[in-house]
Image (cartoon, grey):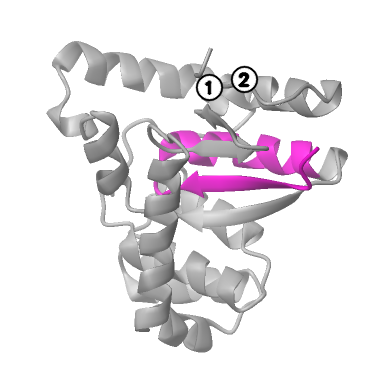
Amino acid sequence: MGTSIDYYFTCVSPFAYLGHKKMMQIAGTHGKSVNFKPFDIFGVWKQSGAQPPAERPPVRQRYRKIEIQRAAIMRDTCMNPSPEFFPTNPVAADLCITALTNDGKDASHFTLEVGRAVWERNLQVADETILSSLLSECGHDAEAIIELSKTDNIAQLREKNTQDAIAADAIGAPAYVYDGEVFWGQDRLEYLEQMITSGRPAFSSDV
């Protein structure tokens, strides 16, 4: 059995935010570490054939907002399905998360707070001032992490996450990979936990 869960996401995804606490609870309960892997969602969508929400047919846009509200109740999470600053550019925040993990820091709290900033607090997480405040609130050295997030090495790590997500058959965000099996969407977290608790081998599409 695997010892870790690869967590592919972009921090402004509503469904990544909705699943975050449950995923961390599953990992903690079963003694699994979590590898935080922010990626370029547009690069993943290009490979999986998905469209950005604003480009989807109106019926799918409407259904998405209903799904957000349903999942918020199921996950006991406060959500505004139409926040003021969404869509927004996630790159700076994703790079801060990448910088935290690269620096050996726990990125879980900051990742959660970025999601909360978008979906509950109506904050603009593309704004460096907001990110600095969130990093400080989470106990990090905001100036150092933001400086690190702007380096070529961190950008390259995010690009590697993107390519790794594509190789793992991630369709969108969030995607959780355990023992080589991919689970797409926060509504698949119970499937992930069943795999862990049962100890079953990973399923394959080569059947």
User: Is 53 one of the magenta-colored residues?
Assistant: no
Q: Is residue 150 visible?
A: no
Q: In this image, 91 relative to 80: left or right?
A: left
Q: Residue drawn 42% across and 75% down? A: 154
Q: In this image, 95 relative to 41: left or right?
A: right
Which residue is tagged 1? 71
State the residue in front, 149 or 12: 149
The vertical placement of 77 against 20, above or below, is: above
Of helix, strand and loop, which one carries label 1? helix
The CA span between labels 2 and 1 is 5 Å
Residue 196 image point, x, y percent: 79, 29
Q: Is residue 112 visible?
A: yes
Quarter location, residue 82: top left
State the residue in front, 14 or 180: 180
Circle 2 packing at 10 Å, graded few (<14), some (14-19), many (20+), is few
Cβ atoms under marks 2 and 1 closer than 8 Å: yes
Q: Which residues are magenta?
A: 1-27
Of helix, strand and loop, which one carries label 2? helix
Quarter location, residue 87: top left
Q: Residue furthest front?
A: 207
Which residue is tagged 2? 74
Q: In this image, 144 relative to 48: left or right?
A: right
Q: Residue drawn 61% across and 37% down? A: 180
Residue 112 image point, x, y percent: 57, 52
The vertical placement of 1 against 40, above or below, is: above
Quarter location, residue 23: top right
State the residue in front, 13 or 129: 13
The vertical placement of 67 against 83, above or below, is: above
What's under tag 1, amino acid-wise?
Ala
Q: Quadrant of the N terminus?
A: top right
